[in-house]
Amino acid sequence: MGLLDALFGIRKLSPPKTDDLFKLPPACVTMEDALDIRPSGKAGICFRAFDTKSFENVKNDIVSILNNSDFRGRYNVLEDEYHFTWVVLENPSIDDLVAGLHMVSLLLIDGGFGDRILCAVFEFKRYTQTLYWVYNYRRGRFYPFVPQTTKERNVTFEYRLKSLVSDEMPIESLDYWYPIWGIPF
């Protein structure tokens, strides 16, 4: 940070951290063995879109690469109720979901839109309950999100999940456990 940046309070965001995404699949084994929590086969990356030609080019690149890569699932690009753009992937393999979201995030970063990435979200099921692991790209850490109703969350179960896998993947500090309402999958 330069002197003028410090004087005027201008902060540059740290570049998104993508490599810790790959720590999720091994933790899935622990969650399944201990609590019968299984990946649902759905995941998405959320980002704030720009209405520019260069952003449209990056979005087209994402679609083109998903169409022509080894990704063996379905995908959809959509906007949620808060006007964030999501690339939602469906694939029964958690490894393929992680690799697919990693690829999408790298395309956004390479296109100059890394600072627009909000998070990645992975859906899991425990019997009839839906829960999520959220990946914070800024900090390179995960946190659980367990919605109970439309605006309430099961914080007790979130703490239990944190304790269960904290040795296997980087866990976000509690100050950054933001609920992600309106997940479009």
Image: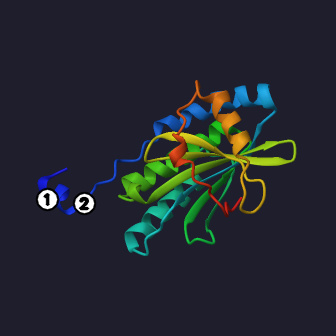
Q: Is residue 152 left or right of residue 24?
A: right
- Residue at image mark 1: 4
Dot 1 and dot 2 residues touching (CB under 8 Å)? yes
Position of the C terminus, as image quadrant, is bottom right
For residue 169, above or below residue 62: above
Which label's residue is closer to the chain start, 1 or 2?
Answer: 1
Q: Which residue is farthest left?
A: 3
Q: Which residue is farthest right?
A: 127
The amino acid on which the numbered mark 1 sits, given as a three-letter code, is: Leu
Instruction: Kindly identify the residue that appears in the image at 46 percent across and 41 percent down.
Output: 18
Instruction: Kindly identify the residue that appears in the image at 62 percent across and 50 percent down.
Output: 121
- Residue at image mark 2: 10
Label 2's element?
loop
Quadrant position of residue 160: top right
Quadrant position of residue 93: top right
For residue 79, above or below residue 147: below
Percent x, y for residue 97?
63, 43
For the residues labelled 1 and 2, the Cα–Cα distance comes to 8 Å
Label 1's element?
helix
